[in-house]
Image (cartoon, grey):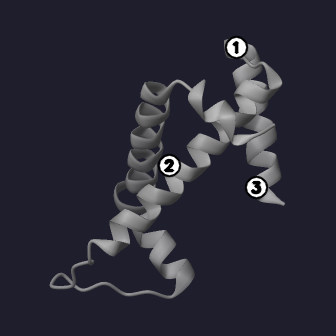
Amino acid sequence: MTFSVLGDVNWLAVVVATVLYFALGGLWYTVLFAKPWMQAVGMEQTDDQRGSPVMYLVPLATCLVSTIAVAMLAYGTGTDTLGEGIVLGLVAVNGLAR
């Protein structure tokens, strides 16, 4: 597979998936599990402490890169149904966990 596949990728789907992936990560690390996560990594945050824009741009960029990679995998493997997409997602997540 070459990078010519990027011309065949559904870029609207990539952008939507990137935004949703980033939003899910934001919810995960702020609203849902902020305190347990910060305790687990040994961090303390005060009320006056604010993050720089880099703290948001780097995760957004990594979400974009991983979404493009999965889109390329989906195109390369011919994944075009919901069931095949679920299997591809499980395989991709399993590969990241190792």
Q: Residues within 10 Å of mark 2 (few under 14, many from 20)?
A: many
What element does badge 3 sit on?
Answer: helix
Image location of residue 91, percent across then percent down: 81, 39
> With respect to residue 82, does 20 lie above or below?
below
Discs 3, 2 touching: Cβ within 8 Å: no
Task: Using residue 21 as the reference point, say whether residue 44 is left or right of it.
Answer: left
- Mark nearest the camera among 3 and 2 is 2
Discs 3, 1 touching: Cβ within 8 Å: no
Q: Circle 1 is placed at which residue position? A: 80
Query: Callout 2, which amino acid?
Result: Leu
What element does badge 2 sit on?
Answer: helix
> With respect to residue 90, does 10 lie above or below?
above
Image location of residue 63, percent across then percent down: 51, 52
Q: How many marks?
A: 3
| Towards the viewer: 48 or 23 | 23
Residue at 84%, 60% (x, y): give it.
98
Q: Circle 3 is placed at which residue position? A: 96
Query: Callout 3, which amino acid?
Result: Leu
> With respect to residue 96, does 87 lie above or below?
above
What element does badge 1 sit on?
Answer: loop
Residue at 36%, 61% (x, y): give it.
30
User: Considering only order in the chain, which callout, 1 or 3, is on the residue closer to the N terminus?
Assistant: 1
Image location of residue 32, percent across then percent down: 41, 54
Separation of disc 3 and disc 1 at Cα? 22 Å
Query: Callout 1, which amino acid?
Result: Asp
Q: Circle 2 is placed at which residue position? A: 64
Separation of disc 3 and disc 2 at Cα? 16 Å
Note whether residue 32 is visible: no
